Image: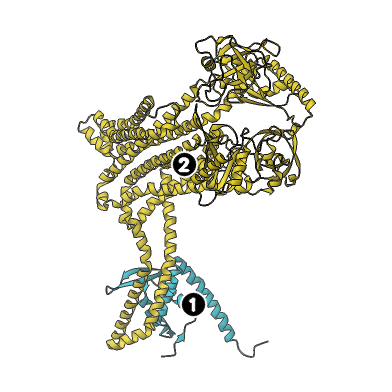
Amino acid sequence: MPDPFPLIRGTLDLLVLKALCFGPMHGFEITCWLERQSGGRLDVEDSALYQALYRLEARRLIDAEWGVTGNRRRARYYRPTATGRAHLRAETSRWLRYTETVSGLLTAPLGAQP
Amino acid sequence: MKPIRRLFALALRRPELARRQTDEEIAFHIDARVEQLMEAGLSRDEAEAEAHRRFGDLARARQELHASAERREERLGMGDRIDELVGDARYVVRSLRRSPTFTVTVAATLALAIGANATMFGVVDRLLVRGPEHVRDPGRVMRAYRTEVNAAQGPQTYASLGYISYTLLRDQARAFDGVAAYATPGERTVGQGGDAEPAFIGYATWDLFPLLGVRPALGRFFGADEDRPPEGQHVVVLGHAFWTRHFASDTAVIGASIIIGNEPYTIVGVAPRGFTGVELGRADGWLPMSLRSASTTSNWTTTWNAEWLMVVARLKAGVTPQAASDEATHIHRAGYTGSNRSLAQASMTLAPISYTRQGRESAEVAISRWLVGVSLLVLVIACANVANLLLARAIGRRREIAVRLALGITPGRLVRLLLTESLALALLGGGAALLVAFWGGKAIRAVLLPDIFWASSPVDGRVMIVALLLTVTTGFVVGLVPALLARRQDLHDTLGAGARDSGVRPSRVRAGLLFTQSALALVLVIDAGLFARSLANVRALDLGFEPRKVLSIDLIWPSIGNLPPDQVQAERARRRAGLLGALEQVRHLPDVADAAIAVGTPFGNSFVVSLRVPGHDSIPDLGGGPYISVVTGRYFETVGTRLIAGRTFTSADGPGSERVAIVNEPMARTLWPGADPLAQCLMVFNDSLPCARVVGVVAEARRFQLREPPAMQYYVPYGQESGIGGSVLLVRPRADALRFAEALPAAMRAGDPTLPRLRVRLMQDAIDPQVRPWRLGATLFAAFGFLALAVAAIGLYSVIAYMVAQRTREFGVRLALGARGRNIAALVAARGLLPAGLGFAAGLGIALIAGRFIGPLLFETSPHDLPVLAASAASLVLVALLACLVPAWRASRVDPVVALRTD
């Protein structure tokens, strides 16, 4: 397994929002989704995920509701609010522009400088 | 109170709940992870260790998550609550707009009731609570009264004292932080020529201002060196309103000169806005006390024979009024140097400055105090009524409420919703109540309490605060009953049964509210009747003259005090000629029935001069008098005093003719019992003058009070007097006196342009202050009584009408089964008439008991006056019958077919 990336501050919130766009999930499902999608390359303590969830909920970007899992246990299910979805869209495009700029700069061929 | 406690519990438990839920979430996560890892092949121990490692330091993480969960709940909770409130408000506005009749009825009821209370608060606040404006700690400022015990009249208490009483108390008393004296502002002419205007000028010793704790708005008050007897400096402190009006608030007036009477004064300061001294009447300016009597009484600072000022003192902290009174009595008795025995033994009292000059609580204040209670009763009636309407409405919405409950609205939220509704109604009413208080306050000030100077608007900050408090309290009180009852309902029953039958409890509550309303309304209507009867009795009082039909005209001449003595005589003669000329001229005006000149008039000036009656060593003392009036011919015809025997004066009686006199009936009876008073002899003014032959006897006319013991009074012709002055011109117009009064000054001046400023008043104006308490009582009790009656009638009607609407189907069934319409109507009417009737009985009882307290406020009216009690009860019963019979009649006409189809 390659070395896991430390997560840039604020990114986790976006990833969680993204995950929830696929449908309501509880905390553990989100963890699994992140691990699966990143191939385990993200270094996140599970508790940090819950911090992110509570933060998002307080900002009314997501909603929470108690529900019952497949094997009949009570779990807190989260889903994005309309504001949350809009927030994700805006932040995603910002993120893309940012990485594009940064990668453009980092990959500029040497010697082509004026 | 259960739902309210629950609401609090919920708020308190919130963080606790958040922590518990977080723990549950963590536990679930770890379990799920362990399960996942074990599926991947780890042993339980290994899986648990790995799950914990991945979660992070569990103890620390748990603590941090608790903190952020609490933060989250706090933020969400606040938002939720705001959302809920907004939602509730929206719902309430929608539902109120759907029933405009209900909304308007309730809001109007509350507006009138809250407005009445706010109005009365505004009045009492000034009369009683706050006292005169700008007086620091008015409760400790007291007025000094003297009580003399007089053989003929018993104890007499009065506030008019001499300067000597002021200096004695000021120099010797230890009970006070300050002693001062003042004379109530009286009307003077200020300015000259076209600039002249009447103004109310008072006198004060310099120490009055520091005693009251007032600070000037501009300049300064006069000081000790300007108010030093025997004669002070000619300085004046202007009243704020006068300064604003006369000088347009010009700050450059300090140091300027102003003419008061006929003399120049230097303006040294302007009193703060609204300052009226110790009393509540208008004050346009203050002069140093030591100017007041300097020209008339040379020994005025030490004599016991010139008593015209009032003494006020500020009690030292910890000194009781009783202790101060005892000390003042001691100082008075030790300091008295005159020869009057009853004065030497007189006692002193210190009493609140709101008391009258007779040392009693004024009738206005006493009645206002009652009116506050009455307005509160009106509010209680209105609350009962509104609670009843809300209750009926809540019952009507049982289904809606039950559905909401079933759909998951919490009972607490439902209570809040109903309370929001009642609060919204109360606020609507409260807003309109401010308008009621504004107009009501204006009317009361102008019509019923015109002698009080009101500096601020009828709705000031304090009135608004009281109105707001009443509004919120009312909203809670009227909302609580239906809200609590709504919560009680059994959900399933309501959903199953439809909204027809009301439960036992609500109907019992409604009957109780009806009972309360009816009882209180009857009490108020009875009291209104008693006051109306008092006022009628006051109006019907035979005063021995006709004050409503006679105008009294003062000619306001400039003061002649500063003319050289030789010119004074000439000026006096000129003025006398001017007055006689005016009389002649007025007499010939087409609208004038009669006119006369008089010195000494009822409720005006009174004079006592030297009088000797042959055959009597001394004149019997009836308590004051015998009073003398100097009148021209046709005086009695002008004022409407009845001639009993002999003749009245004619134009032939005058300076050169035989000396004659007319006596009043008590005087004739007292001096010559059993003998013919005509041709008897009075030696008036001076023993050396020839006898004045009695030529007539007239009826008694009151002099000072509406109710007073008979006093001796005699009249001599104008021109035969000596040593008294102060003439007024009396005019009896043919038609409406008030309308004529407006045109009179111009008409008189057209005849003689040299006439000075004229002050025209109805004679009744001088009596009005004594009638006012009863007018205040009668008017406001009538207003409140009517309000109570209307509110109670609306309440009764709406409850019965509502019941009929609810039971339409049942009545239909009954009618279909053969019941008579009459029986149905009786059934319905009984529902309302029973509690109302019981309420009336209770109200009658309350009124009879309360009569003991209200009796002293009435004028020659028994508090148990049978016609008033009977008429009030009858009119309320009639109103109740009407309120019940209309819906009852409707119930009897229910069409069974239609009724059965509804629902």
- On the image, the x and y values in percent for residue B350 come to 52, 42
Q: Label 2 sits on what residue type?
A: Asn
Whether B386 is drawn above or below A57: the answer is above
Q: B11 and B458: which one is in front?
A: B458
Say which quadrant the N terminus of chain B sits in.
bottom left
Q: Residues within 10 Å of mark 2 (few under 14, many from 20)?
A: many
- On the image, the x and y values in percent for residue B52 come to 35, 84
User: Helix or strand or loop: what does disc 2 sit on?
Assistant: helix
Say which quadrant the C terminus of chain B sits in.
top left
Q: Nearer the viewer, mark 2 or mark 1?
A: 2
Whether B673 is drawn above or below B436: the answer is above
Chain A is which colour? cyan
Q: Which residue extends farthest left?
A: B817
Q: B839 and B860: which one is in front?
A: B860
- On the image, the x and y values in percent for residue B96 come to 42, 46
**Residue with the mark numbered 2:** B117
Q: CA distance from mark 2 to mark 1?
A: 60 Å
* Image quadrant where residue B795 sits: top left
**Residue with the mark numbered 1:** A10
Q: The chain drawn yellow is chain what?
A: B
Q: Residues within 10 Å of mark 1 (few under 14, many from 20)?
A: few
